[in-house]
Image: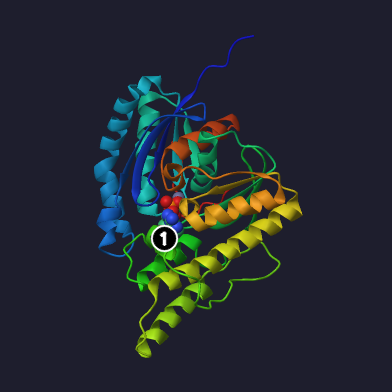
Amino acid sequence: MQEKKDMYILGIESSCDETSVSIVKNGTEEIATIISSQIDIHKDFGGVVPEIASRHHVKNITMVLEECLEKANMTMEQIDAIAITYGPGLIGSLLIGLEAAKTLAWLYQKPLIPVHHIAGHIYANSLVRPLKFPLLALVVSGGHTELIEMTDHYKFQKLGGTLDDAIGECYDKVARVMNLEYPGGPKLDKLSKEGNPTYKLPIPLHDDSYNFSFSGLKSAVINLAHNEQQRGEELRQADLAASFQKVAVESVVSKTKKAIEDKNIKYLIVAGGVAANQILRGEIEKLAEEENIEMSVPPMKYCTDNAAMIAAAGYYAYQDGRVADLTLNSTSSAVLE
Ligand code: KG4
Ligand code: ZN
């Protein structure tokens, strides 16, 4: 029998404020990844400014690509296909990556593989261990809070999602009220370790669905902060961080538990930037133990946006026959299917 040829995929990710290029072998083995983050640039504005993000992607993309090839000690001729995040994300940012990917695909005559950003976050896990089905993916990031069931590679079924703000967005806004620097999620996470959950906050969307809601929780924290200020009381920052984390994490964990039990799930993965959260990681581990199922949370470097996850997902998308031509367009609100 002839041995299957190794497949080297070059992935490009530029959906938000990270310009990243990566080369991954057979969807599982990271060869080289370069990430150019704009966090320091957007910090002064308290969040990502789309126009500025696009301009920096233009400035960085060629450099990041060259550095990645150099680090991998490879040439474009040795690459088998190009995987690109086509959406969702900031349209101006997405377009820069897409144009780079299309140019490379055309110039070097390589297949162009469209990858949904959330599929990328899910497949970040396959860089650590193979995915097992049926699995449940809890996707928690700056733009998403979703529960997705997968019966096989690239067979996605959305069970529920946020009705308003994403959990990461909520973390960042609450952190801003507490004067923590953008992105506030990791800082709030750290601060909460020094406090106790003594502030009473409402548990969001405590119902029978698989959906989430974070705008009410965000407003509750903002109101609490203002009320304390008006009363001349000092806000106990660490206690507020701990109180907020407690309900935010409880909300996602309870819906995840429901989905595991209803759908008879055997494998749970957590994906997206908020998967870096220490409290969430701990609670999910506890849940998996209680439910007696396997789980996987990617290491920190694969949690936030990177192109390795896009190249990994690209491999499985390619096996599923997903190849685009040069008319491929970016879609800011692309649906995972
Ligand atoms: O996946 P990601 O890099 O970008 C999107 O696709 O949205 O996620 C970024 C989000 C930000 O909202 C950031 O505050 C949050 O992930 N985040 C965290 C932590 N680390 C990153 N949120 C809570 N705790 C953390 N440790
Ligand atoms: Zn992301």
Above or below, 280 against 24 in this view is below
Percent position (x, y) of residue 52? 27, 56
Above or below, 159 against 133 in this view is below
Foreground of the two, 87 or 152:
152
Q: Quadrant of residue 224?
A: bottom left
Q: Amino acid at mark 1?
A: Gly
Q: How is the image coloured?
A: rainbow
Foreground of the two, 271 or 14:
271
Q: Residue at x 39, y 48 (%)?
A: 94
Foreground of the two, 311 or 174:
174
Q: Is residue 270 among what the camera can see?
A: yes
**Quadrant showing the N terminus:** top right
Percent position (x, y) of residue 28? 51, 30
Ligand 1 is within 8 Å of the C-beta of the residue at disc 1: yes
Residue ranking furthest to the top:
1
Q: Quadrant of residue 80?
A: top left
Left or right of 49: which side holds 214?
Answer: right
Residue ranking furthest to the bottom:
231
Percent position (x, y) of residue 68? 32, 31
Q: Residue at x 35, y 27 (%)?
A: 107
Q: Is residue 96 among what the camera can see?
A: no
**Helix or strand or loop: what does disc 1 sit on?**
helix
Q: Quadrant of residue 32?
A: top left
Foreground of the two, 232 or 272:
232
Above or below, 299 against 221 in this view is above
- How packed mark 1 is, by other alpha carbons closer than 10 Å (few <14, some 14-19, many 20 or more), is many
**Residue highlighted by disc 1:** 185
Above or below, 235 against 15 in this view is below
Q: Residue at x 35, y 52 (%)?
A: 92
Left or right of 153: which side holds 37?
Answer: left
Q: Residue at x 53, y 52 (%)?
A: 281
